[in-house]
Image (spheres, rainbow, N blue to C red):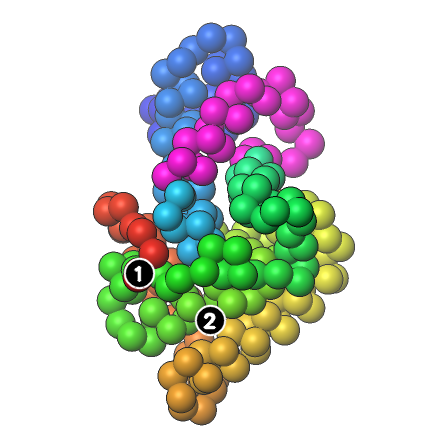
Amino acid sequence: MAAGDTPDIELLERWRDGDSRAGEVLAGRYFMAIRAYFLNKAPAVHEDLVQETFVRLASKLDRYRGASSFRTFIFGIARMILLEYLRSKRRDARFDPMEQSAVDIEGGRMSSVIARQQSHQLVLEALRELPLVDQELLELYYWQKLTAGDIAEILQLPVPTVRSRIRAALKRVNQGYGKLASSPARGDDELEGWLGELRQQLAGLSVSLVPAG
């Protein structure tokens, strides 16, 4: 079986047993997905956070028992690192992802390098203005193609809450886009199409990004 076809759990078990090549294959399989997770939330330090995710993963190999998918396990680690980072930026070390957004902490705007069209750029900005948990919901659902069950496990929310918040968050992004564009909000189908196009752009992105000034 080629390394690219080897199941995650088999690669993980081999990594645990000292096969560093298996670890490299597994990390490579998820590198771009984890990078995309951080990119629109902490763009200035996303590379550091990606690296820390894989360092932390290596230290937690024995904690994965296969009760859930490896994908949810590694995204759970990435989320923990993101929350630690955002809280470290606050003097009181408090950050509520249900209420506060990434832009509340990070400020600034995303570099236009990530988006090829102004409409895409405005969607990214509207996403960043959502409470972090809603931004995560949409990005995990539309960009990572995770199920509501997987997202519920990562965000530690009930599945019905995930489904209802995805619908509500999509409407809020639509409203935010309308304000940023000074134009009427778009239909959900068009917005979902833009999110899909952004997913493709993120997947092919190979340059480092920093917040625009």
* Label 2 packing within 10 angstroms: few (<14), some (14-19), many (20+): many
**Number of callouts in the render?**
2
Label 1: which secondary element: loop
- Residue occupying image coordinates x 64% and y 52%: 95
Q: Quadrant where the C terminus lies? A: bottom left
Residue 169: x, y in percent?
Answer: 59, 70
Depth check: 82 or 18 in front? 82
- Residue occupying image coordinates x 69% and y 68%: 164
Residue holding disc 2: 126
Q: Quadrant where the N terminus lies? A: top left
User: What are the residue bounds of the magenta stretch?
Assistant: 47-76
Residue 194: x, y in percent?
Answer: 38, 71
Quadrant hosting residue 196: bottom left
> Is residue 83 left or right of 48 when viewed as pictured?
right
On screen, residue 116 above or below 148: below
Label 2: which secondary element: helix
* Label 1 packing within 10 angstroms: few (<14), some (14-19), many (20+): few
Residue holding disc 1: 212
Q: Is residue 139 magenta?
A: no
> Magenta part mainly helix, strand or loop?
helix
Residue 7 in view in this figure = no
What residue type is disc 2 on? Ala
Residue 158: x, y in percent?
Answer: 75, 55
